[in-house]
Image (tube, rainbow, N blue to C red):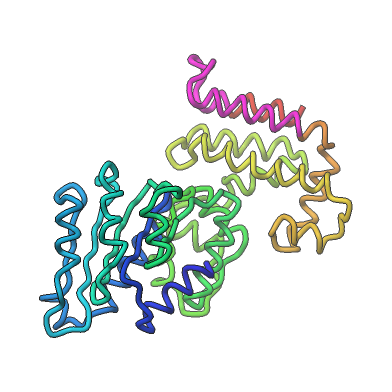
Amino acid sequence: MDEIKQIADDIKNKKLKPIYFLQGDEPYYIDKISDLIAQSVLTEEEKSFNQVVLYGGDVTINEVISQAKRYPMMADYQVVIVKEAQQLAKKIEDLASYAEQPLPSTILVICYKYKTLDGRKKLTKLIKKNGLLFEGKKLYDNQIPDWIRRILLGKSYKIEDKAALMLTEFLGTDLSKINNELDKLITLLPKGSTISALAIEENIGISKDYNVFELCNAIGVRDVVKANKIINYFAQNPKTNPLTITINMLFSYFTQLLLVHGLPDKSKENIARVLKVNPFFVTRYLTAAKNYPMRKVAQIISYLSDADAKSKGIGAQALTEGDILKELLFKILH
């Protein structure tokens, strides 16, 4: 996030690079940076003659270079944005001839999604020297709630921990999808509000009582009845409660329990810092750690791995998602 903020601040302050090579598996920030350049470098009048958007499937590297070598008309810069540039992957190294001496009056933006350059090649070294090379990396499930909090804080909103976890469970790690849902929510709530689990349920349709967050709590205190009610709800609503996401969230939960067991310093402050959770939730982890010794936690992680394989059709052709979940829950609780 700090790197993104620095890039954004530099663009807004006109500290511009002649080449922005935006690559990686997470398209959210690639789109954000390219959109910011498209919106803020030129005035509306200047854009007519000096801003062009090309698509990797429709152009060659030579055509991109030819466009980049043009001079702006009645403006300080021209902006050339190449979207879907990963379609030029086979010839992308040919861009090195331009990257060696880019035109200072051209802002060339390459959106190279789901791929990365070979760091050993000439092009990578030239872009690092003469431009900016940014890699958008996918966040892990356990990093998403903190990302949600920071995004909302930047918009003058807060969110309950439970609500952030509900969004993570429901939407996965797709940052664009999460951001779209957050934008919908904040249009309905006064600025400065704290988004609650109830607001998520009412406006997005995620149950505040039947979700993975509540499942983890029920498992942690060995509430067999409640855990089974949630699992049965999931089995009846598989589209809104995908098995793979449930398994991933449980895996994250028990991995955190494993961390708790391994900590020499089990103070609430240290556990909150290591797990990156609100101190309010530490008591729940300590209770779960008492109910699940380290050996049992390691065994459960193995069960989760087996369930993940079954969810992908490996050795479970006759089992429904609901059956896999019920079998998994029985193994965890016994």
Residue 236 vertical position relative to residue 214 in the rendered view, above or below: above
Taking the magenta stretch, the answer to whether it contains residue 323 is yes
Question: Looking at the magenta stretch, what is its main secondary structure?
Answer: helix
Q: 315 and 329: which one is in front?
A: 315
Q: Residue at x 70, y 42 (%)?
A: 255
Q: Residue at x 56, y 59 (%)?
A: 164
Q: Quadrant of residue 262?
A: top right
Q: Quadrant of residue 249?
A: top right
Q: Residue at x 42, y 62 (%)?
A: 128
Using the rendered image of the protein, determine whether residue 301 is visible from the camera's viewpoint.
Answer: yes
Using the rendered image of the protein, determine whether residue 180 is visible from the camera's viewpoint.
Answer: no
Residue 185 vertical position relative to residue 328 in the rendered view, above or below: below
Q: 195 and 271: which one is in front?
A: 271
Q: Quadrant of residue 180?
A: bottom left
Q: Position of residue 13 (x, y in %)?
A: 38, 84
Q: Position of residue 8 (x, y in %)?
A: 41, 74
Q: What is the magenta range?
A: 298-324
Q: 65 and 318: which one is in front?
A: 65
Q: Position of residue 69 (x, y in %)?
A: 17, 67
Q: 107 and 297: which one is in front?
A: 107
Q: Quadrant of the C terminus?
A: top right
Taking the magenta stretch, the answer to whether it contains residue 33 is no
> Going by the image, does 150 lie left or right of 54?
right
Residue 146 vertical position relative to residue 326 in the rendered view, above or below: below
Q: Residue at x 55, y 56 (%)?
A: 144
